[in-house]
């Protein structure tokens, strides 16, 4: 019995210990070692500033694996109300589960808020490789993304790529993927 208790304590302490994991942006993330129990209650999700491949304002939490390396991974994204991501695609299947809020998802090479489908909390989506899509959030939105790494975001219009159009932690660059003709009140407020 003592041996079982010791193993449980060891497993829990390993799961709670921070280990570096890159998300392709050169920043550190917490990682659960392979073969241990990954368990995160909502208050324990290790939120950090979002990856460089997304516009400023998002938060990310890597829950399992390493998105920058080959292999399975799971991460969560926390998007503020009105947050937008310009048309892009991924080279591998992307599986999304909307945890809370609403993600408005559209397909095509041009951002069109009116052409999106509202995906409320509880929705699941599996997008094939190279499916061009774009999104915006209604209310604070949390989504869980699972895929096979390395995770990449390829923007249809390279000028929409935030890695090229803004400084992290600074003010939003006027060339950001928020269109000037945004029609939602939330997007006008975010655009500032």
Image (tube, rainbow, N blue to C red):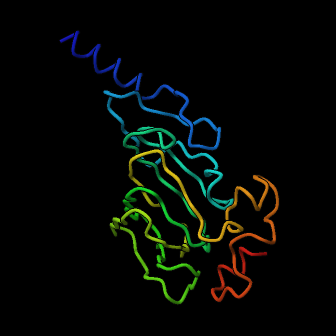
**In the image: residue 192, left or right of residue 145:** right
**Looking at the image, residue 93 lies above or below residue 21:** below
Which image quarter: residue 179?
Answer: bottom right
- 34 lies above or below 78: above
Residue at horizontal 67%, vertical 66%? 158
Question: Image check: 181 left or right of 24?
Answer: right
**Residue at position x 60%, y 45% in the image:** 48
Question: Farthest left residue?
Answer: 1
The single residue placed furthest to the top in the displayed view is: 2
Is 188 in front, or is 114? 114
Q: Looking at the picture, tell me which residue is in the foreground, 177 or 45.
A: 177
- Classify residue 129 as left or right of residue 8: right
Residue 98 placement (x, y as % from top left) = 40, 65
- List x then y, in percent, for residue 62: 48, 43
Is 93 in front, or is 119? 93
Percent x, y for residue 116?
48, 83
Counting every numbered tag in the picture gives 0
Q: Which quadrant: the C terminus?
A: bottom right
- Quarter where residue 177 is shown: bottom right
Q: Quadrant of the N terminus?
A: top left
Above or below, 8 against 3 in this view is: below
Q: Residue at x 80, y 66 (%)?
A: 173
Residue 146 at what x, y percent from top left? 38, 52
- Residue lying at 56% horizontally and 42% vertically, measured from the top left: 23
Residue 161 in the figure: left or right of residue 66:
right
Which corner quadrant of the image does residue 81 belong to? bottom right
């Amino acid at each position: 019995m003592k041996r079982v208790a010791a193993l449980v304590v060891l497993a829990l302490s390993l799961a709670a210990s921070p280990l570096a994991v890159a998300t392709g942006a050169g920043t550190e993330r917490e990682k659960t070692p392979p073969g241990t129990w990954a368990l995160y209650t909502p208050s324990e999700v290790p939120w950090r500033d979002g990856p460089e491949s997304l516009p400023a304002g998002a938060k990310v939490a890597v829950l399992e694996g390493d998105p920058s390396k080959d292999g399975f991974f799971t991460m969560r994204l926390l998007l503020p109300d009105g947050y937008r991501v310009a048309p892009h695609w991924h080279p591998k299947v992307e599986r999304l589960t909307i945890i809370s809020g609403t993600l408005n998802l559209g397909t095509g090479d041009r951002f069109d808020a009116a052409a999106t489908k509202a995906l409320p909390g509880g929705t699941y989506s599996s997008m094939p490789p190279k499916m061009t899509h774009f999104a915006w959030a209604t209310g604070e939105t949390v989504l869980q993304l699972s895929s096979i790494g390395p995770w990449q975001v390829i923007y249809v219009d390279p000028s929409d790529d935030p890695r090229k159009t803004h400084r992290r932690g600074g003010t939003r660059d006027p060339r950001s993927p928020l269109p000037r003709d945004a029609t939602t009140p939330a997007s006008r407020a975010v655009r500032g």
